[in-house]
Image: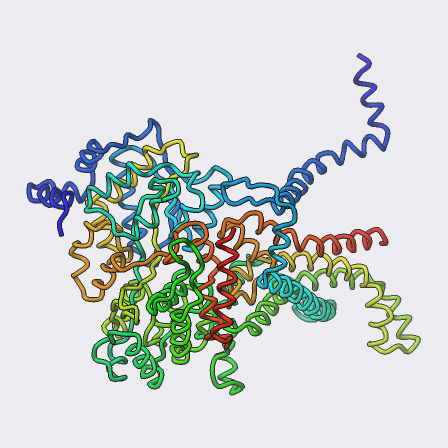
Amino acid sequence: MTGRPQILARLDSPRVLGYVLIAPAAVLLLGLLAYPLVLGVWLSMTSASLGNAGEFVGLKNYATILDDPIFRGAAAFSVLYTVCAEIGKLTLGLALALILNQRFRGYRAARSLMLLPWVAPTVLSALAWLWLLDPQFSALSWLLIKLHLIETNIDFLGHAWPARFSLIVVNIWRGLPYFAIGYLAGLQGISKDLYEAAAIDGATGWQAFRRITWPLLAPITTILVAFSSIFTLTDFQLIWTMTRGGPTDSTQVFTTLAYQRAITGGQLGEGAAIAVAPIVFMVVLAVIVVRSVRER
Amino acid sequence: MSHPDRRRFLQMSAAGIGAATMAGGFPALASAADSPFKPEKGAALQLLRWKGFVKRDDEVWAENTAKFEKATGIKVTIDALSWPDVTPKAALAAQVGSGPDIIMGWNDDPFVYPDKLVDMTDLAEHVGKAHGGYFDTAHTYCFDPEVKRWVSQPIGVTGNALVYRKSWAKEAGFAEFPKDFDGMLKLARGLKKNGHPCGFSLGHAVGDANGWTHWVLWGFGGKQANPDNSIAINSAETTHALEYAKQLYETMIAGVAGWLDPNNNQAFLAGQLGLTMNGISIWASSKEKPEIYADVANVVPPYGPSKQHTIFNNFTSAFIFKYSKYPQAAKEYLRFMLDTPQADPWVTGMVGYVTPALKGYADLPVWTSNPNITPYRDAMAGAKFDGFNGKPGKAAAQALDEFVIVDMFADVCVNNMAVKDSIAKAEKRLATIYKR
């Protein structure tokens, strides 16, 4: 009966215990994340179609999509969508957090309400926005007409650029609370002493923000932007519900195009290649997150 | 034309058994006893179908299913999804080898994974023989010439017709609906002038955008592919079709390029549209708005210069995956649902929203019960298939799923792309798809 004490003794070693404790998480990560990723990369190098395993074709699918103007358009819009949405969410989220960091009547309720766009199911909010932007029944157009700012309804989703811009605005609206709540937590962690010292030194509000608030929010900014960029770059529901990639493929992004090619079109290999393409961007973002966390 | 089953049904009614037939029960059992399909012991079925735009479609289908359950003891679970969601769900079922026993899919869905599907030849031939045979399009969509067997059981089409406001057309100088494309353009211009524009989707609307663009393309004699699947889109006929569409677009309500399938229904029922293309759902839904209901008319779309019927409808058929443990029960269910005692109240209840693929159901009284329903009766007879005049199959299905034809029209109408450039873009896209 020496086996049991031996095992316990080994578990006493932090190194062994560490591996044992991370083993369940590692199995889950390998099974649920690594396997699909590897399978996706493998599929992207095959001629697989629905119900047909296909053959290994090397990088042919990548060559095909790179030659495809629809893919190039989708890639460009994916990047534009992500960059614009992140800039919008960061700026407005920070502004909102600065406001909500103040004590005013009803500030607790305001903080709770702020979360609504984030917690509402994406498809529901996309449908609500679809109505707000409807070419015939848009409440926004109605309001602007009533305010005598425009004479006829705005065709938000019927032309390429207005449709792209509308989707970016809706994404900002949905993701704003994520930034606001993150920044709010960050702001509350900054010592008031720093602001008092700055005030004694005669610093203006802007100077206090530039020299104290912003530098101390930098680490959380990195994490917020990196995570949010990953969510935005892989956004599917919002775009699919509102435009299905139209008009004329002008709002296709990596995910919608991959879905169209792989699932509805049955070309798993080509669809997988499109889905794998943004991984390059995501790996860069993931590295930024990991480095940022380590530095903290 | 009357067919054996219908005649037999009427005879049974005359003999006093008809009442029992309508209520289900004994006649259904009798019918099941004659069936060549013997359900497996302990069978239970799962059906995935699309959700109709007409409420009675789903309701009567569920009532008929309840009759089947009562007659056979086989439990049938129905999952209904919105139109565009069925194709991807079916694709996933094919890929993972698990899911619903029966799927009511669209167009040439079954040609994408024929090897995964149960041979439906016995059922298709049995049902066809009992109900007067099939319209040609049904054979095109459900009989796979590559594997040389029926891979799906034809159901029918959600037929397209032109839907317009009679009083506004009259105001524009048209007491009758025009009989050709030129006449329709004049009507559209008149409607626009009087503040009642027409509207045809140029967005990624599965049914509506594909419906009218293919109708115009084929109406001018244009075609996506030749019978040998060589690409045929680059032609003078396509050019004429796009030039016509551009003129028609100028008469349309703003925003059609962003329209998905529900938009034209909503705009028409809100009194903002004078003319559109749709299934019977607009007219059926307008009952709740008497002032519109009385003024709506449905007509068979006029012929273009090709002088032939060029309607494109969404065709629906039911297929059974090989992973199903109960293929015989599934076949018996489909046979039962397409038999007269069930199909008649289904088609009648939904006022012809689905036009059956079986010729025998073209003489149901519902088709002539109102002149607004009659145009949909002929939706199958005049229908063409996607990818026309090429081979139906994977490439045609993919071209449709990727909205190649719709985007070609939208590029010209909305994006002001030159006609030749738009055709070249579509030709390149089609070449890629057909080479896969």
- Quadrant housing residue B172: bottom left
Q: Position of residue B237 (x, y in %)?
A: 38, 70
- Residue A35 visible in the current orientation: yes
- Location of residue B117 in the rendering, given as x and y in whole percent from the top left corner: 40, 39
Q: Determine whether A184 is above or below A41 in the image.
A: below
Residue A173, image x, y percentages: 61, 67
Report whether residue B288 is seen.
Answer: no
Is A231 positioned to the left or the right of B393 in the image?
A: right
Toward the top, the furthest residue is A1
Residue at 20% x, 45% y is B131
Q: Is residue B17 left or right of residue B86?
A: left
In front of the other: B60 or B362? B362
Q: How is the image coloured?
A: rainbow
Measured along the vertical axis of the image, is residue B39 above or below residue B147? Answer: above
Residue at left offset 50%, top offset 58%: B431
Using the rendered view, name the quadrant where residue B182 is placed: bottom left
- Seen as rendered, the residue at the extreme bottom is A148
Residue located 52% across and 76% down the image: A140
Percent coordinates x, y for residue A99 in the rendering = 71, 71
